[in-house]
Image: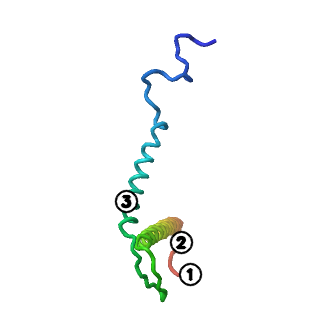
Amino acid sequence: MTDPTRPDPAEPTVGAARSTSDRRWVGLAILSAAVLVPIGILIFSNLKATEVSWAGFRFDQPLWMILIVTFLSGMVGGKVAGWGWRRWRKRRKKLKQELEVLRKHGVDSGSAD
């Protein structure tokens, strides 16, 4: 039996604040608009075709497409460079730790005789 003095949690209460999950779509809508509006402006202000010459190939493409492909290529290149940098630092840290362990155990890090 339920307590009549306690409100039923399934029933909405008057004046209750909405949960953050109910308002999450607002942030997504603002972020989407912040990305899509400048892309739309870019596309509609750069409709003319431009000749591109790259690696011996020549082709005509709308300027907006060239700009977007360049932007996406930069994003991919940045991600790959970041991945390589993190991998290099992780490997360097691991090698330093292994060298420190060898030094603690008295193993010479020089050439083997």
Tag 1: amino acid: Ala
Q: Horizontal and vertical percent for residue 18?
A: 45, 31
Task: Please tell me which residue is depicted at 51% across the width and 23% down the height of the picture.
Answer: 12
Tag 3: amino acid: Pro
Tag 2: amino acid: Val
How many C-alpha atoms fall within 10 Å of the one at disc 1: few (<14), some, or many (≥20)?
few
Mark 1 sits on what residue?
112
Mark 1 or mark 3, which is nearer to you? 3
Q: Horizontal and vertical percent for residue 100?
A: 49, 66
- Sequence order check: which comes first, mark 1 or mark 3? 3
Measure the alpha-carbon separation of dots 3 and 2.
60 Å
How many numbered discs, if any? 3
Q: Work out which residue is located at the far bottom of the displayed protein and give it.
A: 56
Seen from the viewer's position, the closer of residues 102 and 70 is 70
Secondary structure beneath label 3: helix
Seen from the viewer's position, the closer of residues 77 and 108 is 77
How many C-alpha atoms fall within 10 Å of the one at disc 3: few (<14), some, or many (≥20)?
few
Measure the alpha-carbon separation of dots 1 and 3.
62 Å
Mark 2 sits on what residue?
107
Task: Please tell me which residue is depicted at 43% across the width and 52% down the height of the picture.
Answer: 32
The vertical placement of 48 against 23, above or below, is below
Mark 3 sits on what residue?
38
Secondary structure beneath label 2: loop
